[in-house]
Amino acid sequence: MELALIVSRFDIPGNFVSALPHGSGHINDTYLVETEQGGRKVRYILQRINRRVFHNPAAFMGNIERVLSHLQRKMSDLPPLETARRVPRLVPSRSGEGFCQDEEGEVWRAYRHIEGARSFDVAQSPQQVYEAARAFGTFQRMLMDLPPPPLLETLPHFHDTPHRVRALERAVENDPKNRASEVSAEIEFCLSRGELSGSLTRLKALGALTERTIHNDTKLNNVLLDERTGEGLCVIDLDTVMPGLGVWDFGDLVRSAANPAPEDERDLRRVEVDVSLFESIARGWLEALSGALATSERAALLIGAKVITLECGVRFLTDFLEGDRYFRTNRPGQNLDRCRVQFALLRSMEKLEEALERIIRNCETGSNPDLHAS
Ligand code: ADP
Ligand code: GN1
Ligand code: MG
């Protein structure tokens, strides 16, 4: 379907100029659209939603719309131009819906492009990841009083790590692409972490951790930073917002932002937890959530980082074995490289465990011992 035609189905005035592939997400197709409106250049983000992942657009778009209006209300004291930089704004379709479906059944959505801000795939400095952590932490905090009912669970078992490990075991057994023999070391690595993979599930069952509304995909490149000041401005990519454990979001940010190497780095000597990046993430996170975390949740932050890193590696490995059907790849073996990076990162976390726990303990902002996870 021609992109100009899709754009014409949204409430976007003026003339279509261009639509170019944008960003580096693994799931949806994202385009940067340029229009000309009365001599002015106005840009949008247009996205084709991956239907193999997101089956029910009405459900997940409903979640996103509830979250966006809640954030809008929370920021209603700010000048409108400032709110527009801090909360993504959906562009309705011509028929007033939050998305539209084309003749081929593809689901499309458009946002206004936030100008003067950008995201990063790999961390460039401790200050930058501090800003990202503050923005994601503030996002989680602001959603703590989202009026009931809870958001819909649009992707069941999304961060259910034991469930992900079982999917890996099935992929190893079926081995549809005859790749399992190539990755016996990775399979072994994962199976030897059985205790870790079930640890958050156990803490949840014990009542030490409870669910709340979270982002569920807090990769560094899912937050926009002010191009001029570096300030963490706006959390984006809200397709996965739904109930979950707060420590998952901390964990996914550590996984993606404390590693100075790219997610698919082939030289594993470059992959590690950079302690000063980790310290900045922990500080930003705990400042944003100051006083709002139960002691038990604070105590589980590093477990969250280890579990999400393991889980992400398991998901990349499963996809490699299944023939790269879930995560977009642009070269053979990329999902295996991504898996190896996650496992190298987890090894580094295990090696530095004591130092990382100390950093979390030393972060100034206090937890609230009276708060139980409920
Ligand atoms: P994906 O699902 O493909 O990861 P994202 O929603 O994360 O899609 O968008 C991909 C990239 O597009 C982001 O990393 C960011 O750089 C940019 N982007 C997304 N939404 C906006 C927006 N509203 N304003 C400016 N840039 C955006
Ligand atoms: C995917 O869509 P993107 O690229 O932000 C994935 C995340 C993974 C991430 C790994 C819906 O995120 O869960 O952590 O890749 N999103 C979905 O880079 O599966
Ligand atoms: Mg993204």
Image (spheres, rainbow, N blue to C red):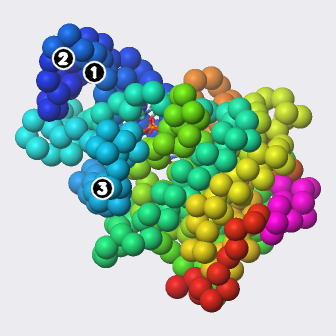
Left or right position of 211 against 73: right
Q: Quadrant of the N terminus?
A: top left
Amino acid type, label 3: Ser
According to the picture, the residue beneath numbered tag 3 turns out to be 76
Callout 3–callout 1 Cβ contact below 8 Å: no
Residue 40 horizontal side relative to residue 260, left or right:
left
Query: What segment is highlighted magenta in the picture?
Result: 349-362
Say which of 210 and 200 sits in front: 210
- Point out the quarter of the image occupied by ligand 1: top left
Element at label 1: strand
Residue located beneath label 1 in the image:
42
| In the image, residue 265 above or below residue 54 | above
User: Circles 2 and 1: CB distance less than 8 Å?
Assistant: yes
Tell me which label, 3 or 2, sits earlier in the chain.
2
Residue 109 - label: none
Q: Residue at x 70, y 52 (%)?
A: 281
Q: Quadrant of residue 271?
A: top right
Mark 3, mark 1: which one is toward the viewer? 3
Which residue is pictured at 83% across the width and 55% down the height? 349
Quadrant in which residue 94 is drawn:
top left
Neighbours of disc 2 within 10 Å: few (<14), some (14-19), many (20+): some
| Residue 82, x across and y down, in percent | 37, 42
Above or below 89: residue 154: below
Residue receiving disc 2: 37
Q: Relative to 234, does residue 330 appear above or below in the rendering?
A: above
Instruction: Compare marks 3 and 1 and give the one earlier in the sequence.
Output: 1
> Where does the image place residue 93, in percent across and percent down from the top left?
15, 38
At label 1, counting other C-alpha atoms closer than 10 Å, the crowd grade (few under 14, some 14-19, many 20 or more) is many
